[in-house]
Image (cartoon, rainbow, N blue to C red):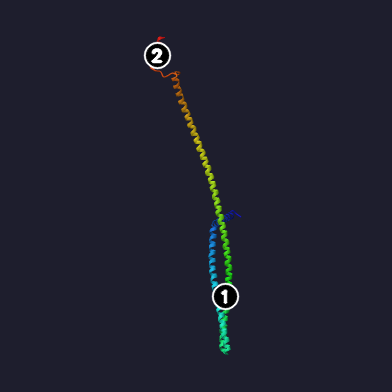
Amino acid sequence: MNVWSKLLTALRGGAREVGESLVDGQALRILDQEIRDAEQELHRSREALAGIMARQKLAEERTSKLQQQIGEYEQYALNALDADNAQLAREVAEKIARLENDLAGERQQGEEFAASATRLRAAIAQAEGNIKQLKQQVDTVKATESVQKAQLAVTQRHGDAQSRLHSAVESLERIKQKQAERAALMDASAELAAEGNGDAALDRKLRAAGLAGSESNAEKVLARLQARQAD
């Protein structure tokens, strides 16, 4: 197999995978539509069954009516025979023969309608069972799909929450570090300020006690010069 054949085979395989993926993605929608189509066909089958049953009932009614008419004409034929009216009895017998032919036809139609109704009832019952099972399977698949989507969403949210939590912890640590640095800087500044204020206070205490010299003034300078002159 050359390179081009392998490439074409790979492309066909990829196209098939894409097609199957699209079909799988719409599987539930396709099943719902197929169920609706099957229910429509089932509805039409019920209507057809109702029509067959109506024809069967009419055939049975015509059969009953023909049987009643045959009974009446048989009595007429017997009465004609009792009256020695052979011609009339023959005419009545011909009428009875026609009614019996009609009766046979109606009975045959009634039997055919009954057989068709029986077969159609069985087909409808089977179709109803199949549709019911398919609906149950679809409901189960939908429920499973919903649960799995919910689990996936929870897993994703948990992962996102963990990531956000980790980021928040890192931000909190940075803030705490900055606060600690700022606090240390403030403590150092306060310590330096305290040291400066302490030196000034100590000088004032020494001068007040006469242990440290004070700033020179004109009186002190004059006194020092007079002492030098006397010497």
- Note whether 16 is above or below 156 in the view shown: below
Quadrant that contains the N terminus: bottom right
Residue at the image point whose x is 47% and y is 27% from the top: 194
Please state the horizontal and vertical placement of residue 159, each as a whole percent of the image.
54, 46
Q: Distance between the residues labelled 1 and 2?
A: 159 Å
Residue bearing the label numbered 1? 110
Q: Which residue lies furthest to the top in this view?
A: 231
Residue 87: image quadrant is bottom right
Give the residue drawn at x 55%, y 72%: 53
* Location of residue 192 with respect to 166 vertically, above or below: above
Q: Which residue is drawn at 57% across and 62% down?
A: 132
Q: What element carries label 2?
A: helix
Q: Is residue 81 shown above or below 146?
A: below
Query: Dividing the image into 4 quarters, which one contains the C terminus?
Result: top left
Which disc number belongs to residue 223? 2
* Rendering quarter of residue 204: top left
Q: Residue 138: image x %, image y %?
A: 56, 59
Q: Position of residue 14 (x, y in %)?
A: 56, 55
**Residue type highlighted by circle 2:** Ala
Circles 1 and 2, Cβ within 8 Å, touching? The answer is: no
Kind of element beneath mark 1: helix
How many other residues sit within 10 Å of disc 2, few (<14), some (14-19) or many (≥20)? few
Q: Which residue is drawn at 38% across and 16% down?
A: 219
Answer whether residue 103 is visible to the viewer in this image: yes
